[in-house]
Image (spheres, rainbow, N blue to C red):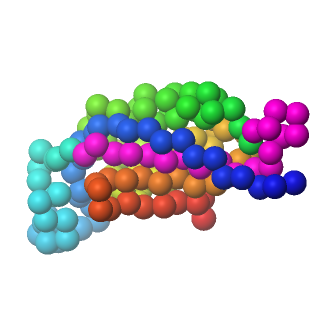
Amino acid sequence: MPVVYLTRRAVFSASHRLHSNQLSEDENRQLFGKCNHPRGHGHNYAIEVTVRGGIDPRTGIVMNLTELKAAIEETVMRSMDHRNLNLDVPQFQDLNPTAENIAVVCWQMLEDHLPEGLLHEVVIRETENNFVRYRGE
């Protein structure tokens, strides 16, 4: 049976401040620069969610795209779109909302809303030039 990778993309707007409670104020400023601004800054993030599986011989699909879209909508979009990640998203109360951590949190949110074993990859595009890829490892 062929294995196929199916990806759905969505875009959300959110603000954040890169700041680690485990570093001093000076260390945070040096490491994160302008991204450590006390009032934060924003991005138009793109998330790409990829599922991996065999093609169902009856339907010809790996997963219904409507269901994948709904899972992204119910988890990521509902909790992160037009939010301040540091203040509005409980997962980032004590976790620095870097693109890396956003990818992991999105994976964790989606994992329970998708059929077991199908989630393959979450990509977070923070800017045109910066993105991270997470595969649940």
Image coords of residue 126 (percent x, y): 32, 53
Quarter of the image for the N terminus: give it: bottom right
Majority secondary structure in the magenta region:
strand
Q: Magenta span has 55?
A: yes
Depth check: give the residue in front, 87 or 13: 13
> Can you say which quadrant of the picture contains the C terminus?
bottom right
Reply above or below: 120 against 22: above
Residue plotted at (13% across, 65% down)? 33
What's the residue at 20%, 71% (across, down)?
31
Q: Is residue 116 above or below residue 58?
A: below
Q: Is residue 64 left or right of residue 33?
A: right
Residue 132 seen in the figure: yes
**Point 42% across, 61% down: residue:** 132
Residue 108 visible in image: no
**Residue 52 in picture, x, y percent from top left:** 70, 52
Boundaries of the magenta span: 43-61
